[in-house]
């Protein structure tokens, strides 16, 4: 299933051990056997059916085609996998095939010499994926193959919109403010946001930046770490305008993103709020948060982030991100073949028809069954530019400082200039 | 700890000890090798414990200190030595300074509020009242409940609008805070403290009750014969004799408050707007969330230094009284 990209890391025991340097949480990978057989370790986060059994089948098919190769699968819950990967990277003993989120995190992994360059070995696949691979490319080299890419947008409850008398989804911020007022008049809480986890609040700022800043300023910022362009301050001012309409659920400053019925996603799934700005994984998350397992079901609607008045960004640009298969530097060569197989038309079609994500191989696009997801796929493929989530793009250190300050902006304890300053300060420490 | 009082009181006996030791050595000379055997025995029995201690206590502490001198992302070689830069960053970080302040606010509030409250309830439960055993159990239950479970329950109770506590407040005609108790920056720390008091008051009461068992009945009787009222007996007899217990409890409470993590992490995660960060949540955020392990290392060393300094000062200035009284 679509899994949340990240979540509150609860593996504190493991993390605590890590902090203290006694990393006992490592992996047990044995890359090559003695009798000419090869074992590939593979970590993924599809730990529920149908994804889990689909991937088991994929591994079996690959083993059948490659005698002597054995694939050892570890299917984990997303948060567990992230924690374990952190521990694995610290110990230097990472699985042969694993999930890589790209951006600054990947750059660090590459710096440490732990990720294999796939540019030549998987040239065909990279060409097929096209622009989506950009988030996993450093200095013209591709280090991982994205298998699922989605975009962030507003998920909304079509019933509540109809109840308030809203017939068309907003395309400008002013229209959004008008809809917020209409919903409030109808006694409906317009929006939920999990500002307690910070990144859901940060997505608002990312999007207003994307709408306010010209594309080249953003692209430049990722490499030069220069945030002096006034459009970044303007982005914060737009967020302030939105906050002035008081659109969010009560207690949003400590609301969690997607844990339980009182989380931001839970409030949307149970019909307590009308809209939420979230990633493509939202339907899957909502299904897990309702008793009947349907989430919002056929009341699920989606619209892209509205245009910002006077903004220099293209309103069809999107904020997004995804997951890619990375290969360890120490992995046997056949692991690269396996990753190429995972990106093949056949596997990506199966991936799509099981609603496991939004495939990056264009051949699989038509196999997506879920109507909300296939609509999203169109938006993603039509977008002239997809900006990787800023916190992923800039890495955990800068991204964390940025998200923290944006959360303060949401609490009215930081100005738009403060957000830029805090980000710049964290970025300067990286230079 | 070093205790001048204790040293002075044992001083007169020292010569005696010395002569006795000299005597034994002269009278019963051990066969050669017995000393070695004894040392081997000691080594044999102590080594496993020391090895575990070295592996799980000494080595992590040493590597945290080492980490604090490097800029390190959590993987790859640790080779970017930056001296005391991490400490400078941490000490200049408003979030950390506020975290230290929050820790000390909790320490202060614990003594100011939990001590009198715990004492009052302990004195009450020390009287012969009906259902005393049951009441004592009820008071102690929160302390036994797992911290995470208690935290999650309170988190749900404190939900704005849909939560039980907001519902109760509304049903008596008052208006709960718009963003909820945990979501309003000015109320969040106080709310966390209320939950902590609920959780840890049981321990204070239990300790105080135990201390009260140590007050001899004769003292009460004597006071009553002298015509002292119940209040006077408590004020002049029970509470002064409870002094050592209270000082010990305050020490435990102080250390616990300085290391406060779990309850804050569950209830607010340090938010809203960093209103409830503690040193421990700061270093976890810096380490596991932002991958600034060097900064997290520096913060953990500072946490250790602050905790250690407080403990030593407390021993020197407060607990010293108890130690010298006993001898």
Image: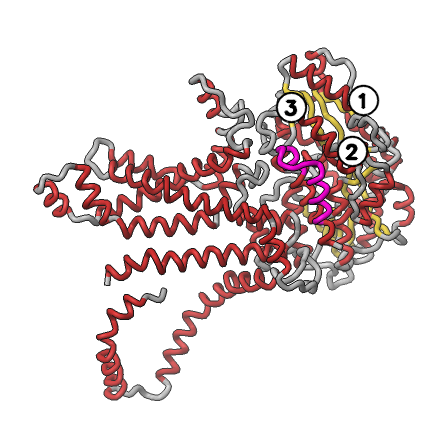
Name the one closer to the observer, A67 or B110. Answer: B110
Residue A170 in the image, given as x and y percentages of width and height: 78, 20
Task: Determine whether, in the image, residue A421 is placed left or right of residue A367.
Answer: left
Residue placed under numbered mark 2 in the picture: A151
* Residue density around tag 3, few if under 14, some if 14–19, many if 20 or more, within 10 Å: some
Q: CA distance from mark 1 to mark 2?
A: 17 Å
Q: Is residue A176 above or below residue B153?
A: above
Disc number for residue A246: 3
**Residue plotted at (55% across, 24% down):** B178
**Mark toward the start of the polypeptide (3 vs 2):** 2
Q: Quadrant of the N terminus of chain B?
A: bottom left
Name the one closer to the observer, A85 or B159. Answer: B159
Residue A32 visible within the image: yes
Segment colored magenta = A406-426
**Mark toward the start of the polypeptide (1 vs 3):** 1
Name the one closer to the observer, A139 or B91. Answer: B91
Say if mark 1 contacts mark 2, CB within 8 Å.
Answer: no
Residue A298 visible within the image: no
Q: Quadrant of the C terminus of chain B?
A: bottom left
**Mark toward the start of the polypeptide (1 vs 2):** 2
Residue A132 picture quarter? top right
Disc number for residue B259: none
């Amino acid at each position: 299933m679509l899994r949340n990209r990240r979540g509150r890391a609860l593996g504190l025991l493991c993390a605590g051990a890590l902090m203290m340097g006694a990393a006992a949480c490592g992996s047990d990978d044995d890359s090559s056997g003695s009798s000419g057989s090869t074992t590939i370790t593979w970590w993924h986060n599809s730990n529920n059916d149908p994804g889990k059994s689909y991937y088991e089948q994929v591994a079996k098919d690959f083993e059948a085609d490659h005698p002597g190769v054995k694939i050892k699968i570890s299917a984990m819950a997303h948060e567990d996998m992230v924690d374990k990967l952190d521990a694995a990277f610290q110990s230097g003993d990472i699985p042969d095939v694993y999930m890589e989120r790209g951006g600054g995190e990947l750059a660090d992994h590459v710096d440490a010499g732990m990720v294999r360059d796939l540019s030549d070995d998987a040239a065909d696949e990279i060409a097929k994926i096209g622009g989506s691979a950009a988030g996993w490319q450093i200095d013209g080299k591709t280090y991982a193959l994205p298998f699922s890419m989605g975009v962030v947008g507003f998920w909304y409850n079509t019933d509540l919109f109809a109840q308030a008398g809203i017939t068309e989804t907003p395309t400008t911020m002013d229209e959004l403010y008008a809809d917020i007022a209409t919903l409030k008049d109808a006694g409906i809480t317009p929006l939920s946001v999990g500002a307690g986890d910070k990144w859901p609040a940060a997505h608002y700022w990312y999007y207003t930046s994307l709408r306010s800043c010209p594309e080249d300023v953003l692209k430049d910022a990722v490499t030069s770490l220069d945030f002096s362009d006034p459009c970044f301050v303007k982005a914060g001012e737009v967020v302030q305008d939105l906050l002035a309409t008081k659109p969010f659920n009560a207690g949003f400053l400590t609301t969690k993103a997607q844990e339980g019925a009182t989380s931001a996603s839970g409030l949307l799934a149970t019909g307590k709020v009308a809209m939420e700005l979230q990633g493509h994984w939202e339907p899957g998350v909502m299904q897990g948060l309702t008793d009947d397992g349907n989430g919002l079901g056929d009341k699920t609607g989606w619209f892209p982030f509205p245009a910002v008045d006077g903004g220099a960004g293209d309103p069809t640009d999107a904020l997004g991100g995804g997951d890619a298969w990375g290969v360890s530097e120490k992995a046997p060569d056949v692991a690269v073949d396996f990753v190429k197989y995972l990106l093949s038309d056949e596997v990506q079609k199966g991936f799509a028809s099981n609603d496991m994500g939004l495939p990056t191989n264009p051949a699989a696009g038509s196999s997506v069954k879920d109507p909300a997801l296939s609509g999203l796929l169109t938006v993603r493929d039509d977008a002239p530019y997809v900006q990787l989530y800023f916190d992923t793009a800039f890495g955990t250190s800068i991204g964390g400082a940025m998200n923290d300050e944006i959360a303060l902006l949401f609490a009215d304890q930081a100005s738009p200039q403060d957000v830029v300053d805090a980000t710049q300060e964290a970025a300067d420490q990286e230079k | 700890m070093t205790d001048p009082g204790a040293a002075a009181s044992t001083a007169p006996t020292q010569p005696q000890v010395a002569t006795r030791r000299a005597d034994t050595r002269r009278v019963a000379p051990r066969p050669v090798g017995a000393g070695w055997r004894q040392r081997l025995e000691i080594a044999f029995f102590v080594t496993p414990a020391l090895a575990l201690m070295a592996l799980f206590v000494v080595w992590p502490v040493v590597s945290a200190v080492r980490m604090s001198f490097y800029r390190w992302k959590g993987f790859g070689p640790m080779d970017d030595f930056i001296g005391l830069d991490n400490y400078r960053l941490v000490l200049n970080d408003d979030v950390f300074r506020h975290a230290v302040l929050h820790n000390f606010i909790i320490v202060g509030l614990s003594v100011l509020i939990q001590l009198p409250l715990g004492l009052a309830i302990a004195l009450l439960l020390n009287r012969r009242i009906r259902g005393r055993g049951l009441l004592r159990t009820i008071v102690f239950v929160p302390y036994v409940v797992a911290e995470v479970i208690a935290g999650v329950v309170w988190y749900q109770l404190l939900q704005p609008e849909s939560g039980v506590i907001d519902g109760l407040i509304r049903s008596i005609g008052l208006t709960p805070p718009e963003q909820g108790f945990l979501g309003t920056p000015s109320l969040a720390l106080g709310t966390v403290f209320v939950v902590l008091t609920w959780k840890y008051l049981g321990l204070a009461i239990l300790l105080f009750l135990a201390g009260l068992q140590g007050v001899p009945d004769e003292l009460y009787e004597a006071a009553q014969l002298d015509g002292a009222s119940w209040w006077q007996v408590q004020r002049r007899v029970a509470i002064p004799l409870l002094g050592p217990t209270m000082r010990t409890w305050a020490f435990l409470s102080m250390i616990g408050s300085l290391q406060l993590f779990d309850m804050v992490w569950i209830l607010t995660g340090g938010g809203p707007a960093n209103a409830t960060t503690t040193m421990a949540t700061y270093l976890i955020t810096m380490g596991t969330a932002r991958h600034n392990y060097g900064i997290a290392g520096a913060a953990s060393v500072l946490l250790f230094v602050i905790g250690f300094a407080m403990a030593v000062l407390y021993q020197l200035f407060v607990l010293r009284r108890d130690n010298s009284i006993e001898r």
